[in-house]
Structure formats: C-alpha cells, structure tokens
Image (spheres, helix red, strand yellow):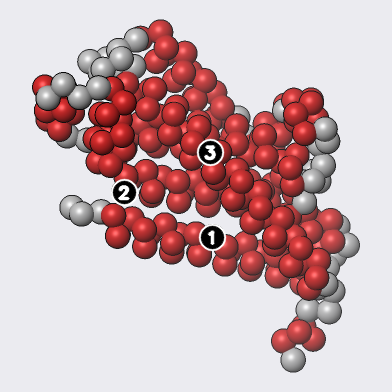
Amino acid sequence: MFLLLLPNVKWDKMFSATLETLYMTAIAGIFVFILGLIIGLVLFLTAPNQLLENKWINRVLSAFVNIFRSIPFVILIILLLNFTKFLVGTVLGPNAALPALIIGAAPFYGRLVEIALREIDKGVIEASIAMGASLWTIIRKVLIPESLPALVSGITVTTISLVGYTAMAGVIGAGGLGNLAYLDGFQRHRFDVVFVATVIILVIVFVIQFIGDMITKQIDKR
C-alpha cells in the first residue's frame, strides 16, 4: 500500500544514488579527518606560547582556514572546476565532488581540532615536556588522547555537514541522492522521489550522529 503512494520512485536508482552518497561521504570524511587533524595541530602548536610558536605560519594558516570556511560550498565547487578536471579528469560523478568536499570541510574540521586541543589542561603538556618527551611523543601520547572525545564529536559534526554538501554537489552533476532528487524529482515534478531521497539522507544523518555519540561516550572517561 505504501509503495503505491510512491509511483515514480525507481528503487534501483535510489539504491545506487544512496551508495554514491555514502561513497562520497566516506572517502571525503577520511581525507577531511587526516587533513583537518594536521591543520588543527599546526594551528595549535604554532600559536603564541606553544611548542612551535610561529606567528607567521599561524596567521597564514588561520587566514587560509577562515577563507575556505567562509566560501559557500556551491560557489567553491564552481571555483574548483578546472582543478577538479585536472585532478580526476571530469567534473561529473562522485569522484569529481571529492576535491570540493575535502577542501570545503577540512578547514572547518581543522578549526574544531584546534579548539579541542586548546581545552587540554596545560599542566599535562608541561609535565610531558618536563619529563623530556619529544614533540611527536607529546602529539601521540598527550594531545590526541586527551582531546579524543572532542575530536570524535568534531568529525561527527563534519561528516554530517559532508552529507549535506554531497546533496548540493548532486545538483551540478556529482551524483548521489541530491542529483537524483533534483534531476529525477524536482525537475520532473516527481515529489515522491524528492521525499524518499530526503528521508534517506535524514536516516544517514541520524545513523552518523548515533555512531558518533556512542563512540564519544565509550572513550570519554571524564
């Protein structure tokens, strides 16, 4: 009975579009986590009174982060069209969306990482320095473990943003649920297609949030 209310929904296409959305979100999420962690660590370590204090590196990187966080994602995709074509050979399909997804979200997550690191008790870091720990040891044994719950919460929020970005990227041919909802749904006045695509995106978001919250509770010992 329920399926009769959705006469225009092609479930094989919906399934394929869902896989494309999950693919873009997962691949971009991995790169965003790695790049964002590096950006956040550099921002934190080069800040005043930190281990690698360097005002010029900090200012330049901070400006880079602020600029790319401020550019609307749809505009960023357009600005990166030539770069995307050079990198992946096309401006259509899920792979073509990845550069914009990563460049758009990594600075955002990098700022969240920096904020998480600032919340660490300075006494813990000072104690590690007093014991002769190297920079790499401090990063690996102090900074990341101490901020891990916040890092997981940050990547959860960022991944949810990526799901929304994939929907916007779909409007200009990146594939996924956004592309299906716009081309097969909105443009053809098939609003049941738009409805189902929206529900699936909401389910993906809820699942990501649930997993992120569960992991955060497991590792947060406070």
**Residue tagged by mark 3?**
32
Tell me the amino acid under the disc marked 1: Val
Could you say where residue 122 lies in the image, as x and y percent from the top left? Answer: 16, 29
- Residue at the extreme bottom: 1
**Residue tagged by mark 1?**
205
Check disc 3 and report its element: helix, strand or loop.
helix
**Residue tagged by mark 2?**
149
Residue pictured at 44% horizontal, 20% vertical: 62
CB of mark 1 within 8 Å of CB of mark 3?
no
Q: Which disc is residue 44 wearing?
A: none
Check disc 2 and report its element: helix, strand or loop.
helix
Above or below, 211 relative to 116: below
Residue pictured at 20% horizontal, 24% vertical: 133
User: Which quarter of the picture shows residue 111?
Assistant: top left
Which of labels 2 and 1 is toward the front?
2
CB of mark 3 within 8 Å of CB of mark 2?
no
Instruction: Tell me if I can see residue 115 in this picture.
Output: yes
Q: Camera-side residue: 140 or 214? A: 140
Circle 3 crowding by C-alpha within 10 Å: few under 14, some 14–19, many from 20? many
Sequence-wise, which precedes: disc 2 or disc 1?
2
Which of labels 1 and 3 is toward the front?
3
Above or below, 206 relative to 68: below
Check disc 1 and report its element: helix, strand or loop.
helix
